[in-house]
Image (spheres, rainbow, N blue to C red):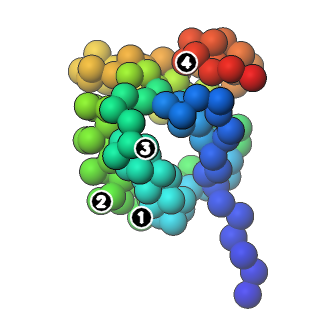
Amino acid sequence: MHSVTPAIVALQSARPDLLSFEVRGQIRKSDIEWMAERVNAAFDEIDKIDMLIVMTNFEGAELGAVFDAEAAAVSARSLGHVRRYAVVGAPAWAAGMINVFRWLTPVEERTFALNELSEAREWIGATA
């Protein structure tokens, strides 16, 4: 039996109120559940957080990952806990959805091209 490389990994952050993740490959249900656990734990500890998602090699998602109940609950809960949400390197369709729906949420959301990672880190307030 071989181990499966996670498609979502945590990136180090100097700020406890900044969650950073890198997405690479195809997202599976287990990846979404892992990420949802970390985000929920942060919501339990910290009132307001910022999130940075860096999509370096996104290859889509399994159907089970897209329609995950735990992820949906975290998304709903995020409306009260996330200040800023930056997505770097999102495919055009995902960036379009974020840019359209950002006007409907209290979360400050921005998308950046992969070559704009430093600008995204500056906007989100990340250091190092």
**Residue mark closest to the camera, 4 vs 3:** 3
Q: Nearer the viewer, mark 4 or mark 1?
A: 4
Label 4 neighbourhood size at 10 Å, few (<14), some (14-19), many (20+)? many
Marked residue nearer the N-terminal end (4 or 1): 1
Q: Secondary structure at mark 1?
A: helix
Circle 2 SS class: helix
| Residue 123 relative to residue 94: left or right | right
Q: Residue furthest bottom?
A: 1
Quadrant of the rendering where the N terminus is positioned: bottom right
Task: Say whether marks 4 and 1 touch (CB < 8 Å).
Answer: no
Front disc: 1 or 3 = 3
Q: Secondary structure at mark 4?
A: helix
Whole-number angstrom distance, CA of label 3 to CA of label 2? 18 Å
**Mark number for residue 124?**
4
In the picture of the structure, the residue carrying the numbered disc 2 is 69
Q: Earlier in the sequence, mark 1 or mark 3?
A: 3
- Mark 2 is on which residue type? Ala
Q: Nearer the observer, disc 3 or disc 2?
A: 3
Q: Mark 1 to mark 3: distance in Å?
A: 24 Å
Q: Which of the marked residues, 4 or 3, is nearer the chain's N terminus? A: 3
Mark positioned earlier in the residue sequence (3 or 2): 3
- CA–CA distance between discs 4 and 2? 28 Å
Q: Which residue is mark 3?
A: 42
Report the amino acid beneath label 3. Answer: Ala
In the drawing, what numbered circle is on residue 19?
none
Work out whether 20 lies above or below 27: above
Query: x%, y% of residue 84?
Result: 43, 21
Separation (CA) of disc 4 from disc 1: 30 Å
Tell me what residue is drawn at x 75 percent, y 23 percent: 128
Sequence-first disc among 1 and 2: 1
Name the residue that disc number 1 marks.
64
Q: CA distance from mark 4 to mark 3?
A: 17 Å
